[in-house]
Image (cartoon, rainbow, N blue to C red):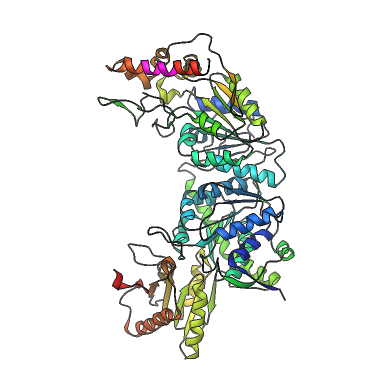
Amino acid sequence: MSKLTVVEGSYAVAHAVKVCRPDVIPAYPITPQTHIVEELSQFAANGEIGACEYITVESEFSAISVLIGASAAGARTYSATTSQGLALMHEVLFNASGMRLPLVMTVANRAMSAPLSIWNDHQDSIAQRDVGWIQLYAEDPQETADMTPQAYKICEDSKIMLPAMACFDGFILTHVYEPVVLLEQDLTDEFLPPFAPEHILDPSNPKTFGAFADPSIYTEFRYMQELGMSAALKKIETVADEFNEIYGRYYGGLIDGYYLDDAEIVLVAMGSVIGTIKDVIDELRAGGKKVGLLKIRSFRPFPTDAIRDAVKNAAIIVPLDKSISIGKYEGALCTEIKASLYNTRIDIPVLGYIFGHGGRDIPPERIKKIVSEAEKAIVSGITIESSYADLQEELL
Amino acid sequence: MNKTTELFAPGHRGCAGCCDALAAKFMLKAVGENCIVVTPTGCLEVFSTPFPESAWNVPWIHSLFENTAAVASGVEAALKALGRKNDTKILAIGGDGATIDIGIRGLSGAFERGHDFTYVCVDNEAYMNTGVQRSGGTPFAATTTTTPAGKASFGNLRPKKNMPQIMIAHGSPYVATTSVAYPKDMMRKVKKATEITGPTYVHVHAPCTTGWGFDGSKTIELGRLAVQTALWPMMEIENGEITGVHKIRNKRPVGEYLKAQKRFKHLFSIPEGAEIIKKIQELADWNADQYDL
């Protein structure tokens, strides 16, 4: 039985990074990511991360650029960021995936300015949907910590070679103190082999990284990224199983279900709100309501087939989003779930809710209200496809 | 590997008389094969690496336009962490736009952090790859496609940003200015820069046949005129002190330099041209006096 220790979520993640034996960590502080990089700097100062180069860069733009240079030179790399910092990296995120560099970065999810908000939602990473990075979302500090070696193992696979962001909710998970199992070094060494890329910057075998492509070849490079993502669909599942075998913990692969098999109302969500939803489901199930949860762990690659299979017997699907596409008035899960069901024989109404933006609390009552509205919609049909669940209209 | 002894191979797609190609070829001759080159997006990158071709017989990486120094930082950090740094030199080669303008934040950060690498700015004084637009390196009164001359303008209104001074202010152990027109001087300085531990900076003046408007056979001639008129002083600054200055034997008037280029052609026809040429001569005279050229 592994020992539980009460630590802050950020510490659990930093410790997980340490046991993955990174070679280069560039860090730029931004709330609420700071505790992760502070803990890592202390590990480095204590000489606990081997020869790792910890670099205090002058911006997130340089943090991600350092990762590119270091990874191309053969290093296992790590950084963490959030919100504005992730947005500042935007251009470089495309570049990292296009160059097929298996960077791993933790994203402490936070709202986007303006108005300025340091609190949690998923707008920052969702806005990076199309940059070609694997995007995984964790429910609690333990899952986030465990996702770190999993992410390395997934993206360093020679058939994948794509960067990954492991996302967890800012403050709610970064700053919470919870009992966790700190990842054991020996188990991690068993689980995660050293990074040994086929192509590196090496004067004894000179190679060109980052050539430009004219219209005769550009499309093929992009499609090969898509193939890498497709390979990740399977790898995310097998890595979750391998992790379970070695560490004895499992959170699902691409998705996870909670009371899903016979659920009439299927709530769909990512991140820390999963815990609240599970509590609500326990209560509602005790009252005989057939409510279940589809937890999305992998947003990119998007597990279309797994989702179709998981929801096919539902009476209504209710995506709950901490992001919004302004001008479509929908969250990302809502849009993508609907798209996944089109062109299939599955004809189930989808009722989307957007909530918890800029750190607004999501109490169990709000979930219950959503469930009761979904029950009504099963009978009377959907009138509004998507809306804010926690809008204070009196403030408008 | 290409079948050539050149580390920067011929057969690339640079213009005849291209300053970037000259710079890359001679710099690599000086530094040798045990190096890793980082370049930004730009002419040099585009004409040397149209997939699947590459002119680079050394490991080479291009990421983006404005992150060259940060990518070089990452390469250096990785080599150190992996125990592979040894004598391997890391050479970043950026144009004036990538260095002076859009990449200055990352460059400043990398120098402040003290990474062991050499950054070379090959300065052809405008955004040539996009079609000759003004940069912070464009000299006073030059026309570019975004600072054209007209009834209300004589071209670029601002003087060239003094990038070497900015790098000196970072406490770099070695900052040098040189020119592609003096390949031996350039090779010596770049080699010296790579042999000094810490972040070192070499600013190479580089006449662009296309952007400046002169025949491709005159690149060296133009580069020499810039030095001989004292518009481009060549020197070495070690730990903040000037330790070497290239002396001018036969000082030439700036008019000779200006007249040889289309980008200054308007100065010889507009009414205020003579006054502007006089101001440019004053800049050259100030250089000659200040640095005892």
- Judging depth in this view, the residue of A175 and A91 nearest the camera is A175
Rendering coords of residue A118 (x, y %): 46, 61
Count every numbered label the image shows and give the total: 0
Left/right placement of residue A351 relative to residue A246 reads left
Q: Along the line of sight, which residue is nearer the eye, B147 or A197?
A: B147
Q: Quadrant of residue A5?
A: bottom right
| Residue at the extreme top | B250
What percent of the width, then of the height, locates residue A28? 55, 52
Asked if the stretch drawn in magenta spans residue B280, the answer is yes
As drawn, the residue found furthest toward the left would be B151
User: Residue B268 is drawn in which quadrant?
Assistant: top left
In the displayed structure, would residue A81 be above or below residue B228?
below
Q: Position of residue A221 (x, y in %)?
A: 51, 49
In the image, what residue occupies the spot 39% across and 24% down? B140
Q: Where in the figure is residue B7, as x and y percent of width and height? A: 63, 30
Query: Is residue B217 visible in this depiction of the protein?
Result: no
Instruction: Read off the magenta span.
Output: B278-284
Q: Is residue B288 magenta?
A: no
